[in-house]
Image: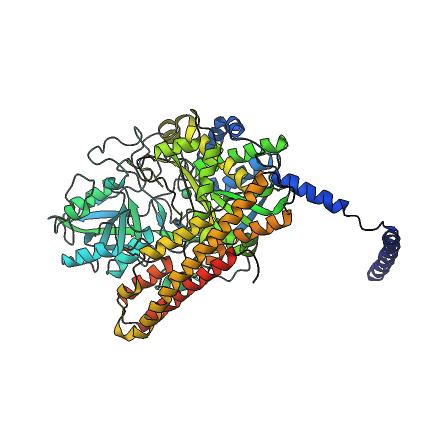
């Protein structure tokens, strides 16, 4: 066997060698006989580029509106929201298949997946977490273990209330009411001489994140945390607590907001690296030890409805703090620390676990661009949901599938985008933005090289008042331009409608730096992002009341929030136009001047170094920073001048394009676009946030510390917040000096990027 194998290989080798020789001879003959260089081919190529370059508006706003099919959106919504689909459940696995099937059937798309192996937080069993009020006479009052099914829905695999990634525990003691669980709320209780050590903290949602509430409680000596949704925070209408689901969209007393209490986004075992099979993973025991900053809460936490919270509040004694709390429950809010007569203690039992190795399946559908296939416009949504998730984020999942269908239809009609379009169905978002983040970590160099913009549609519809787009400053104008290009349902443009809706409020867009799948794109990759949602009138609710509860169901969406799925259609239309705009326009529609203005505003509203409270021990850094701060100002002035030059260059080029000028070099246009694509990336810095090395955007990252300052630069605010607590540590002042220096350097770096040539 061995012998004959060898001789066969020899024969094959000889055949290949002979073939190559013949090919070489033919190639040489061809070479010798070729005509003198003819530039007509190059000319033809250049003509083609020019023609393609100028071809825009492959389809119009009217045709987008005519193409949208709300029945298709409804079909996807009812399929996907028919059962809970949080990561790690059978309902969840089925959604990836559903997406693959639907997208594979569409013309123009190639479908593929990228998988990561990640941990998710789950309960142990069903309904084994709860709190109890234990009376001296032996009576025990238990909290509900699951929401009551107020409408029969036959939902299987329901997720019990959980603050995922908090430790299990069985603790008992007095209960204190710590309002939002902010540091200042605990300080307030301390001022009232309430004993926090050994107590269970009852807190309301809002103010700071779930994990931060628990970490704060632990820092003040509390042994457990219970979190609920107070009606006053927009979850229900105080004084009208009978007007709730299923008759309206307001949260009933049994509704519970679940959620992740993890404090670092993505897989905490592989910070800054993708969770691929060979990835080195930090052990959970090690991660749990990290306290500066913490990743996990050290104490058990549990979410309850306001009905259960009232039971607890009803047995608390201590100071009446109702005027401090301004809550919405018909009860006196008391500081606690002791119980009403007859009550012995309260007990909190949490049975949580971490399920490792869950397959996070990101499903992608790619439509290749015909002129610049290596430049990408991305649009993404997450597929997982805490319950049926009709709002978060299945409304967006259904819209993404309709956007794909519409693009497929335009493709069939002959349309091709200039740049490639990549639709992304992310997985494991609810457990701390995991699927998208891991992919960004996996493909970081390629994303920085190729991505023009990332458009996020998480919750497509959470109200029926108006579309609301937010974006980083580079893309805010483009997000509005898409609305200007689209006719409104009842005449005029969608932009006119948008302006009317936000007339009495400031309709300027904000920069999304919260937590959804855009986070890794802006905070780590530093590529431009847009986020959109159809929202409720902020006069009534700043979010939506049934958020992450079991009542986020299809009937509520179809009969109360968005009858006829009108708002869903509006978001789909905007999404298609946004993709067309970013994938088709010859010059990328970025607004550098807005970016620079945003940075200037941050600088102008930041507290100057003289007021930072430098201790004498850090005097040498104080002096240094005062000089650097002046340099910061002049660096910004130089940047503004450069930005103005770029602005007029863009305008001149656009005018030549609009005038049909024949002598525009497509290569130089491409170079111009490339340079502008990387403007945001000059803000990426390894020292952007002292507290979290995975966040790299110096200007647009979320803060990790709780501060009262809302303007300024996130890394600097974080450091100043730490310095406030640990003022005598010289090291922290040194880091502040280093950070200010990095900020100034990046302003110069940004200016170099705006310049037209040279190194
Ligand atoms: Zn979501």
Q: From the viewer's side, name the closer residue of 3 and 725.
A: 725
**Which color mode does the image show?**
rainbow
Instruction: Tell me if residue 568 can be seen.
Output: no
Q: Position of residue 491 (x, y in %)?
A: 43, 25
Residue at (44%, 49%) from the top-left corner?
Answer: 593
- Above/below status of 6 relative to 86: below
Is 610 placed left or right of 24 in the picture?
A: left
Q: Check the picture and name the quadrant holding the N terminus.
A: bottom right
Is 94 placed left or right of 699 in the picture?
A: right
Q: Check the picture and name the quadrant holding the C terminus.
A: bottom right
- Above/below status of 687 relative to 582: below
Q: Position of residue 637 (x, y in %)?
A: 41, 58
Q: Position of residue 240 (x, y in %)?
A: 21, 32
Q: Position of residue 260 (x, y in %)?
A: 37, 49
Is 293 placed left or right of 406 in the picture?
A: left
- Above/below status of 239 relative to 438: above
Q: From the viewer's side, name the closer residue of 419 and 282.
A: 419
Total labels drawn: 0
Residue at (25%, 52%) from the top-left corner?
Answer: 181
Dividing the picture into quarters, in which one does residue 166 lie? bottom left
Picture quarter with ligand 1: top left
Instruction: Tell me if residue 125 can be seen.
Output: yes
């Amino acid at each position: 066997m061995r012998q004959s194998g060898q001789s066969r290989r020899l024969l094959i080798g000889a055949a290949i060698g002979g073939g190559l020789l013949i090919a070489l001879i033919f190639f040489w003959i061809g070479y010798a006989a070729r005509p003198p260089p003819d530039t007509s081919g190059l000319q033809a190529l250049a003509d083609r580029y020019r023609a393609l370059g100028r071809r825009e508006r492959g389809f119009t706003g009217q045709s987008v509106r005519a193409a949208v099919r709300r029945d298709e959106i409804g079909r996807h919504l009812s399929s996907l929201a028919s059962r809970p689909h949080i990561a790690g459940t059978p309902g969840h696995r089925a959604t990836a298949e559903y997406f693959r099937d639907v997208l594979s059937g569409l013309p123009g798309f190639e479908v593929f997946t990228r998988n990561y192996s990640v941990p998710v937080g789950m309960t142990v069993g069903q309904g084994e977490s709860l709190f109890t009020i234990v009376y001296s006479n032996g009576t025990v009052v238990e909290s509900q273990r699951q929401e009551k099914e107020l409408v029969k829905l036959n939902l299987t695999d329901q997720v019990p209330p959980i603050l995922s990634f908090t430790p299990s525990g069985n603790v008992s003691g007095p209960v204190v009411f710590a309002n939002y669980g902010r540091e200042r709320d605990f300080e307030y209780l301390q001022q009232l001489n309430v004993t926090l050590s050994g107590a269970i903290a009852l807190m309301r949602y809002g103010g700071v994140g779930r994990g931060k509430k628990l970490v704060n409680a632990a820092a003040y000596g509390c042994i457990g945390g219970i979190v609920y949704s107070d009606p006053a925070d927009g979850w229900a209408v105080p004084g009208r607590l009978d007007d709730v689901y299923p008759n309206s969209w307001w949260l009933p007393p049994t509704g519970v907001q679940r959620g992740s209490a993890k404090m670092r986004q993505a897989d905490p075992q592989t910070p800054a690296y993708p969770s691929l099979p060979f990835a080195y993973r930090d052990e959970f025991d090690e991660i749990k030890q990290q306290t500066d900053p913490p990743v996990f809460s050290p104490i058990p936490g549990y979410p309850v409805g306001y009905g259960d919270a009232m039971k607890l509040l009803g047995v608390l004694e201590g100071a009446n703090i109702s005027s401090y709390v301004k809550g919405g429950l018909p009860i006196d809010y008391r500081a606690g620390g002791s119980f009403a007569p007859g009550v012995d203690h309260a007990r909190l039992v949490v049975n949580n676990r971490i399920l490792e190795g869950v397959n996070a399946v990101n499903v992608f559908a790619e439509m290749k661009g015909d002129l610049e296939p290596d430049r990408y416009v991305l649009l993404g949504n997450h597929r997982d949901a805490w319950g049926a998730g009709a709002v978060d984020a299945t409304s967006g999942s259904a819209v993404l599938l309709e956007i794909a269908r519409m693009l497929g239809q335009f493709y069939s009609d002959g349309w091709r985008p200039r740049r490639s379009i990549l639709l992304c169905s992310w997985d494991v978002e609810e457990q701390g933005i995991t699927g998208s983040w891991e992919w960004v970590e996996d493909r970081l160099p390629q994303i920085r090289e190729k991505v023009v913009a990332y458009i996020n549609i998480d919750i497509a519809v959470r109200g029926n008042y108006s579309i609301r787009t937010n974006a980083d400053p580079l893309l805010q104008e483009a997000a509005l331009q898409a609305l200007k290009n689209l006719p409104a349902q009842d005449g005029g443009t969608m932009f006119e409608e948008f302006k009317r809706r936000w007339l009495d409020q400031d309709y300027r867009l904000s920069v999304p730096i919260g937590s959804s799948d855009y986070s890794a794109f802006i905070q780590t990759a530093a590529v431009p992002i847009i986020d959109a949602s159809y929202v409720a009138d902020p006069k009534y609710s700043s979010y939506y009341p049934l958020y992450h509860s079991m009542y986020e169901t299809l009937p509520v969406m179809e009969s109360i929030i968005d009858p006829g799925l009108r708002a869903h259609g509006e978001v789909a239309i905007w999404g298609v136009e946004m993709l067309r705009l970013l994938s088709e326009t010859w010059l990328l529609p970025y607004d550098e001047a807005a970016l620079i203005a945003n940075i200037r505003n941050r600088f102008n509203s930041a507290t100057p170094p003289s007021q930072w409270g430098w201790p004498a021990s850090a005097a040498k850094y104080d002096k240094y920073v005062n000089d650097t701060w002046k340099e910061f100002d002049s660096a910004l002035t130089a940047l503004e001048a450069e930005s103005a030059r770029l602005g007029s260059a863009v305008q001149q080029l656009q005018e030549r394009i609009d005038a049909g000028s024949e002598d525009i070099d497509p290569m130089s246009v491409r170079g111009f676009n490339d340079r502008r694509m990387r403007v945001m990336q000059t803000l990426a810095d390894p020292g952007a946030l002292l507290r979290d090395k995975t966040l790299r955007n110096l200007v647009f990252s979320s803060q990790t510390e709780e501060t009262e300052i809302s303007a300024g630069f996130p890394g600097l605010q974080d450091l100043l917040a730490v310095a406030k607590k640990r003022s005598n540590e010289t090291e922290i002042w040194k880091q502040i000096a280093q950070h200010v220096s990095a900020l100034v350097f990046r302003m110069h770096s940004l200016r170099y990027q705006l310049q037209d040539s040279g190194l």
